[in-house]
Image (tube, coloured by chain):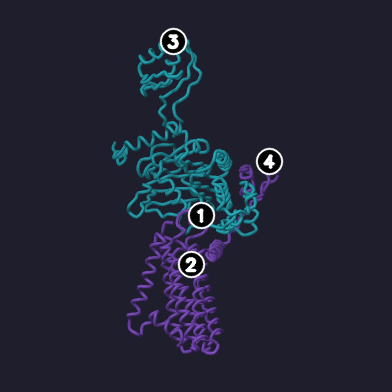
Chain colours: A cyan, B purple
Amino acid sequence: MGGPGKRVPRGETIVAEDGHGWIVETQHLTKIYRNRQIALNDVTLTLEPGCVLGLLGPNGAGKTTLLRLILGLHRPTAGSVRVFGRLMTPNAADIRRRIGYIPTNPQFPRGMTPISYLDYIGRLFGLPRDVRKPKLATLIRAVDLLPHSGEPIAHFTPGMTARLAVAASLINEPDLLIWDEPTHGLDIEARRSMLELIKQLASEKTLILSSHNLSDVDEVCNHACVLNKGQMIFHGTLQDLKGRIRRNHYELDVDGEHKAISKAVGVLRGLKDFIQVVFRHRRLDVKLGEETPNTALLAQLFQVLHDHKITVISVRTVGMQTEQAYLDLVEREESRGFVRLYPASEAA
Amino acid sequence: MSTNAAARGEWSRSGSGRRAGEMTDPPAVVTVRFHRFLPYWAVLQTDLRQTAQGWLFVLWIALVVIGVCGFFLYRVGVQQEAGLVQSAAVLCAEALRAAFLGSLAVVVILSVAAISSERGTVADAVLSRGISRHQYFLARQHARVILVGIAFALISTGIIAAGSLLFRGEADISLSGAAVVIGLLSLLLAVVAAVGVVLGALTNSAVLGITIYWLLLYGGGLLLMLAPESWPGPERELTRLRYVLQGYYSAAYYGRIALTAIAIAFAATICGLIGFSRKDV
């Protein structure tokens, strides 16, 4: 991704330092379906080689539309998409030869077996027989479909279908992988395998993963792009996204005399910037204010606990970090309303 | 899933198949050669096979064969029981007329559905690969045109051959006339299929495309029936089939019809190519 993580004002262009080498570059990308539905609104983003981008957003945010525009399956209403430095169009077959795509709920032509399907996909990429045949055999082996290689795909479980889709997306040795919700509908074991595969592929390829599952993105991605109602509200590194979390809500599992704990709670409630202190079932729930640095407040908290001879068993922030940061972003974007029309820089 | 294989050099650019740690020499870079027209052939072959195995195509052939067999058996019965002598050309023309008009309805569905029924994830699985919209469109269209053309040519050949054999006493069918009828009817149905694929590519739903095409074809045919005699109406041309089968026809006239039909198909294909490459799938 180009540039540090930041909220993207409407229409802002992120320019690379050297201006070259983007895998994907979109400029003011907008998609309006039949003048009725704005699916994507002025999205400008860049993707550099080796980036694993997690595409996040609620249902209808425009994630799949963005992916389909990048692939040239849809034509933009306005703006442009460049992939490997070249303009993506519906007829840009040579660019798509370098992309591996898995749609959400992949479907396959009826009556085909994994071998015939992968052979078909290989031919769609223009791969000659001597390249195609060994490759499809290797892939079928790699995704553990060898015992089922002669069975019709129609009888496959979702896990097997997902593995076949992975094999199909890798047959052309792509430089860019675009996987739309690859863990959707998979059981725990298949999901784990998929995530491990993504991690391994990430070392040599550029990936775009669309997902609803924030823990998946948290585990395998190094960059994130958040869409909400067709608008890109964040793009940058995952660390930048997590940096937006409100670091003021903690849970502490404590041990000590009940009387001492109640006394400590009373003291904490009297302190400035301790907005909420609740003790329930040996768990202390503390919300801190944002004005004072949280390190100072936490020091006060531990001092009080120490003074009352209370032992801390564990400390954690409330909510998963990425999830919390994502929810905060979406919530803030919802509340901005008309403000988003006038970015702070313009207003100044 | 055995994910280790994915991470190994098995599908890396080097293509050497050895682990990185085992390599002593730098891996030889294999440049993957792409066959430019292989995607077109892949879609064409797959569509031909799948359409020929599809229930609609099988139903079409079965209905036409059963209908023609029933018609001829009835006529043979009439000839043998009542002793009515019947012209083979007349009977074959009647059978061909019914088969053509019946086939028209099915060919519309077969052709319009070629692209429009696959919109969405199935088309995604194809169009997201290394195939251009032009190649995909042409492959689909050519597959349907070939299948419809060949299927009807075989059907009409079968009808004429059966008619000639069953009504040998009044075998008045000329070889050249039969060839013209088979060629012309097959060509017209193939053109209907070609234009149908275009409509399917340009409309947003198969049902809408089929409805529009049926209205155009049957409505247009009805209007042409009301047109002056000098105009080539479908009903008039189908009525004349008996004379063509007997060898009474103008090669120039039917040549003009064939050329006009090909020109219509060609123009429609150009529109389809342009329109489909500008559409979302």
Q: Is residue A244 above or below residue B251?
A: above
Q: Which mark is residue A260?
A: 3
Amino acid type at mark 4: Gly
Which x, y percent locates residue A266?
38, 13
Residue B141, disc: 2
What amino acid type should be assigned to the residue bearing mark 1? Answer: Ala
**Image position of B223 with respect to A150: above or below:** below
* Residue assigned mark 4: B21
Q: Residue at x 41, y 12 (%)?
A: A262
The kind of secondary structure element at disc 1 is helix
Mark 3 falls within which chain?
A
Q: CA distance from mark 4 to mark 1?
A: 36 Å
Q: Amino acid at mark 3?
A: Ala
Q: Earlier in the sequence, mark 4 or mark 1?
A: 4
Visible residue check, residue B246: no
At horizontal 42% and vertical 74% (from top left) the residue drawn is B264
* Numbered circle sitting on residue B125: 1
Labels 2 and 1 positioned on one and the same chain:
yes
Q: Which element carries disc 3, helix, strand or loop?
A: helix
Q: Nearer the viewer, mark 3 or mark 2?
A: 3
**Toward the viewer: B195 or A18?**
B195
User: What secondary structure is found at the residue carrying circle 2?
Assistant: helix
Q: Callout 4: few (<14), some (14-19), or many (20+) C-alpha neighbours within 10 Å?
A: few
